[in-house]
Structure formats: structure tokens, C-alpha cells
Amino acid sequence: MKIRSLVMLACTVFSVHASLADDKIKRSDYQRPEAIPAPASNPLTEEKTTLGKTLFFDPRLSRNEGMSCATCHSPDHRWSDGRVVPLGSEELEQPRRTPTVMNSAWLKALMWDGRANSLEAQAVLPITTPHEMNYNMKELVERLGEIKGYRPLFENAYGDTEITTERIAMALATFQRTLVSNTSSFDQWVEGDEDAISSSAQRGFQIFNDEAQCAACHKSWRFTDDSFHDIGLDDPDLGRGKVIPVEVTIMQHAFKTPTLRDLPENGPFMHDGSMTDLEEVIKHYEDGFIQRASLSKEMKPFELSDQQRADLIAFLKTLDGGPLAIEQPELPEE
Ligand code: HEC
Ligand code: HEC
């Protein structure tokens, strides 16, 4: 009897410790990095950030001078546009929703299908895409060259006033690297402030990692594995399947795992903007996905109670650091 209760006590103590340790390991997996990464070929500087910010908000980067990067990546919409279909894409057959550019310094693959591999490479795409800014780099370089107010900005950033495609792209990339999520209540909890998030949200964190297996794909402090998966949405867009050979079954209908930080209040969510609330998203993962050959192996049906679903949503809301307000730049004069 005595031995038995000792064993039981030992087991209890052991399991309490095990679950604490377990919890710690998981929490520290989500710790924020201390510094913003930048490539050696384009180090972060304040001067390049100022130039990049000005370019980002300047509609003169589009042919008809009506659209800037910030038209679609707006600070008021968590650096996205809050729209299902981006402005200017209405006539496109398979439009994709505008992703946020927050925390883009850490992106390994850019665009929903990963067709750009750096912020520098990505920056010229929207400028030259017909249904977006519809311009070309040669004429843009000429146009900016005629705006006197840009000269000191380029000179401060690069040492002389020369304007090139590369310099424009490097400055846009640098500014975007500075857009980092504010500290959220989840971050405070990760740092050890036990009361920073509700007990419902804490249960939601466990569900996220255990029953619902969301962390199989939404990993690390940015809540993405930087990889591509078919999560069984009913949409004809082949996503990554259009970029890489059709024989790679697993990449058909696959899209990049998006971050879960700073999600817009009512969506729209997913590459096609097809969902508008988090309950709908969770139910999709429970048993709403289409079975097909390309479906990710990580997509396994499960069932949550209403309470568990509410807990999971409470947790997702703790990942919101609030709007990232910045002072809008003054646009240089001709
Ligand atoms: C008409 C709206 C629109 C404009 C203007 C626009 N974007 Fe985008 N942006 C999008 C859409 C839509 C995507 C996703 C496209 C895709 O994946 O096929 C995107 C993707 C991105 C991404 C990749 C994010 C990720 O998570 O992979 C970055 C970075 C970005 N844009 C930066 C910019 C910059 C810099 C400018 C200005 C030079 C700009 N965008 C102008 C709509 C826009
Ligand atoms: C198999 C990997 C995988 C698993 C498991 C997974 N996700 Fe996702 N998640 C993705 C991918 C990929 C997308 C984008 C899909 C698309 O648009 O085609 C996504 C999109 C989302 C979005 C929309 C975000 C946005 O900006 O549009 C939310 C919210 C989300 N997931 C939450 C969850 C939750 C909660 C769970 C657990 C119940 C979960 N995910 C499990 C890979 C996964």
C-alpha cells in the first residue's frame, strides 16, 4: 500500500514535471527573434528605409499614377487590403487575395505559389504586372529621375543620385523588412507572463499543438513552415502546381502556409479569400476538406467541441499585436 502510493506520487510528480517541460519546449518554439535579418548584399540602413518607404507609398510607381504598393498593402488593413479580390484584378480568372507584407523579412518563399525567392526579386513584379501597377522599369527609372525630390533620398541611401531598377528594389525590400509585428499578448505569455492570455486561450494553445495539429504546418513565431500544402479547398487554382512539374503530385493545389499573426478581424482568409470567419476555418480543418491525391498528409480529420473551437479562436486572437502604425512619408516634389 505504502509502496503503491509512493509510486503513484512519484508518477504524479513525474507527469507534472513532464507536462511542464513539454509546455516549456512548445512555448519556447514560438519565441520571437531578436534582430531583423537582411542579406549581406542589401544591409538594413535608415536611409534606404526612408527611400523605400517613400517609394512604397508613391502612386507614381504605377503607369497611371493611381496605385501605390500601399493601395493593396495598407497599414489600415494589417498591410493587406481587406478585399477578397485585389483592386485591379477583377477581370482575372483566378485572382489571389493580397497577403500581408508584415514580417516579410523572414519570408523564404514569396507569393502564394513561391514564384519569387527574395523581397528584392519580388519588388519589380507588382510594378510591371499589367493588372497591378502596369508599368515598366525603364520608364519608371526615367520618371523618378525627373522628380527632384528623389535625388537627396537616393544620394543618402546609396552615395550618389543614380536611379536603377536594382536600387529601387533594394529600397522597397529594406522598408518592408522593417515592418515587424508588435508584441502581442501571446508573446508576453511566451516570455513568462502567465496572466497575459486567458485560460481559454491557453487551452487553445494546447489544442493548436495537440488535438488539432495546426502546428504541423503553422510553426515558429511566425506560425508558418514556409512550405506549400494542399489543404483541400474547393478551388481550381493549382497554386504551386503551376510553377513546378506536374509530376510532383503533392504540389498540385498547394499554397504557401500563411502566417497567423495579426489576422484581419473578419478575413477574408485563404488564397482565394473564400472564408470570412475563424470558426469556418476550423470546421474546414475538422472535416470540410476535399480528398484528392495532392491533399497534404498532415490533413487528418478531427472533432472539436464548441468550447474547444472557442478556445482555439481565443488563442488565435492573442497573436494580434494590433495595427502597425507608421508615419506616412511626404511624397517628393517634381
Ligand atoms: C493591386 C494590388 C497590389 C499592389 C498594387 C501591390 N501588391 Fe503586393 N501583392 C498583391 C497580391 C494579390 C499578392 C499575392 C500574389 C500571388 O501570390 O500570386 C502580393 C504579394 C506581395 C508580396 C509577397 C508576400 C508573401 O507573403 O509572399 C510582397 C512582398 C508584396 N506583394 C510587395 C509589394 C510591393 C513592394 C508593391 C509595390 C511595388 C506591391 N506589393 C504592390 C497585391 C498587390
Ligand atoms: C497541412 C498543413 C496545415 C495544417 C495542418 C493547418 N494549416 Fe492552416 N493553412 C495552411 C495553408 C497551406 C494555408 C493557405 C491555404 C490556401 O490559401 O490555399 C492555411 C491557411 C490558414 C488560415 C488563413 C490565413 C490567411 O491569412 O488567409 C488560417 C486562419 C489557418 N490556416 C489556421 C489553421 C488552424 C487553426 C489549423 C488547425 C486547426 C490549421 N490552420 C492547420 C496549412 C495548414
Image (cartoon, rainbow, N blue to C red):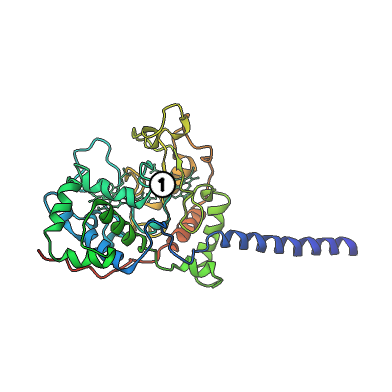
Observer-nearest residue: 134 or 113?
134
Q: Residue at x 26, y 59 (%)?
A: 74
Observer-nearest residue: 21 or 51?
51
Give the image quarter of residue 44.
bottom left
Q: Which part of the image, by quadrant, shows the C terminus?
A: bottom left
Q: Is residue 76 visible?
A: no
Left or right: where does residue 307 sit relative to residue 238?
Answer: right
Observer-nearest residue: 89 or 234?
89
Q: Which part of the image, by quadrant, shows the N terminus?
A: bottom right
According to the image, label 1 marks what residue? 109
Question: What's the amino acid at mark 1?
Answer: Ala
Q: What element carries label 1?
A: loop
* Residue 189: % across, % down: 52, 68
Q: Is mark 1 within 8 Å of ligand 1?
A: yes
Please determine whether, in this image, residue 211 is positioned above or below residue 105. above
* Residue 282: % across, % down: 45, 48
